[in-house]
Image (spheres, coloured by chain):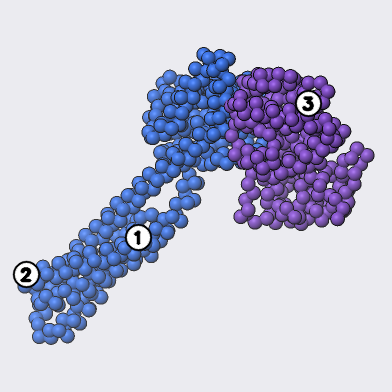
Amino acid sequence: MPDLASNAPSQRAAQGHIVERTTLLRHGIATTSACALIAAAFSLSNHGRWDVNLIYSLSIGLTSWLTIELGRWRLTRGQDIPWPGGWRGAALVVAGIVTGFVIGSLIGTAYRKWADPDASTALMHRLWIPLAVTIVASTVMSLAFFLLGYSRHLQMQAEQARRQAAEAKLTLLQAQLEPHMLFNTLANLRVLVASDPQRAQAMLDHLIAYLRATLGGSRSTEHALGEEFARLRDYLALMSIRMGARLQYALDLPEDLAQVPVPPLLLQPLVENCIRHGLEPKLEGGHIAVRARRTAGGQLELTVADNGMGLDSGAPALPGSRFGTAQLRERLANRYGDAAHFELAALPEGGTLAKITIANAG
Amino acid sequence: MTSSPRALIAEDEPLLAEDLRQALARAWPELQIAAMVGDGLSAARQALALQPDVLFFDIRMPGQSGLEAAAELADAWPEAQPFPILVFVTAYDQYAMDAFEAQAVDYLLKPVQPERLARSVQRLRELLAQRTVAPAGAALAQALEQLRHLAGATAPAATATEAPLQMIQAGVGTQIQMVPVQEVVYFEAADKYVRVLTASHEYLVRTPLKELLPRLDAEEFWQVHRGTVVRAAAIASAQRDEAGRLWLQLRERAEKLAVSRLYAQRFKAM
């Protein structure tokens, strides 16, 4: 999925700056509030003066939090989830607790000596209480921050996927409703209406089905492979009336694969590429074969082959041509992740072969 | 114009070709259809052989486009004969249509509407009538002028932001040979490749000439033929042969390069 990988990091880096600053502020406020609550709890249960407790609590809490916060940003620069994985995450929390407790205690003790030199040091002799509180508070806070950050990350990811899907639909629509194709088809229809009304009607039905699929079908996220092949049949029937004997085609869909769900109009751009770059420029035209089969390994394999001009025919890249296959890769990656593969190859005897393989597709 | 006018139809979609023939039969009964062809290569070949008065060329055709076919024909057309009147036919080519308007070239939109066709036929009849009094070369000169402008206006938009090409990277065996463009004497389209010729070497690159051309400095490299782009500074002289063809003599290479009529206007004495 080169297309996804290439543009995502820069986007994320740009967003990252703003996100990090607001996150830092939010976490700081949350930490301060928690420290105040802990100090209040100590004071109310008659463990020393409230101001001393507050300074202790804030010093330990904020030092611990800052250590962890700065540490994880140093360790995770450029990562999707701003939290170091595995033992490094745990080690960071421990480091934060130790640093926070040592430095915070020093500050707290210094304040206590200055503010209240005569007070009993009883609390400070029982070191384990503040230590335990620090450990529990730091761990709980870190976990909460991690979970919040993680859910935000998931949310952003979902949003990005939605945006990509919307863009994909739009470009798919633009690619398919090529005015040149539409007007040429209408011109053929106009001829047939007078000369062969029955064929005209059949052609009109194909055009209606094609337009319905192109305009409306792209709203659903999936349809059956049988449906996909029916749309290809519509398109090829239209093209066949236009190109006459120059276009031959064969569609091969085994019955047991007809119900397998696939993203709508997945194969359409491939067949359109065959026509546009393979057969239309070729004097004698040629043949297109679309085939679905289950491989020995249980994968769904979809192939579109033609005997047209081939890949390095030197045909100039018409706008939208290479874009079509980039789009397809992106759609497969969005829907199947690493389970789907797409390859485009030149056939030794001339022409091209486009192949999609999908593991565990329905 | 002595007898009834003759036309050639070049259209790759059989139903549309037949429809245009029938529509013309109704709108212009005395017009004879000399031939109907389905691709750009036959279009130029048949037009040269049959020498019709009017050409109806589809733009998108296999082999080569209608525009390319017209340019090829204009290059090979005998000067003593009046060049046919060109009518382009298109379903939807926004750039081409704008260019046709600008150059006052006749064009028809598919599906062809009877009223529109009738207007076209009216105009074509008038043009043909004028031809009987005009010198034969005038029509060719006018067609060349129009085609020159069309070639410029309908070429894929050059990526103006892209810096001019400095180095040609040519694959030689397992190596990539770096050839500075200043060393190139000329480029020549050859089947699926482009031959890159320097004073002493020859390389092949896979990038089509159409894609290479917009990336070359137009002042430095001149297109002189459909398949030939030559470095202006490498041209020693231009000469006309007995048949009126223009040939270029190069400074650093022995080959002579043919100049097509479309580009011949570049070579005039100052």
Give me the disc on residue A19.
1
**Spatial separation of the CA atoms under disc 3 and disc 1:** 72 Å
Q: Report the Cα–Cα distance between label 1 and label 2.
A: 39 Å
Q: Which mark is residue A88?
A: none
- Asked whether the viewer can see residue A315, the reply is yes
Q: Earlier in the sequence, mark 1 or mark 2?
A: 1
Q: Nearer the viewer, residue B266 or A1?
A: B266
Q: Check whether the beta carbons of the residues at disc 1 and disc 2 lie within 8 A of each other.
A: no
Q: Number of marks in the image?
A: 3
Residue plotted at (38% across, 59% down): A16
B18 w.r.t. B170: above or below: above
Residue A255 at what x, y percent from top left? 43, 19
Q: Residue at x 50, y 34 (%)?
A: A177
Identify residue for label 3.
B52
Position of residue A255 relative to residue A272, above or below, is above
Mark 2 chain:
A
Q: Position of residue B251 (x, y in %)?
A: 87, 53
Residue type at the position of mark 1: Val
Give the quadrant of residue A217: top left
Residue designated by label 2: A45
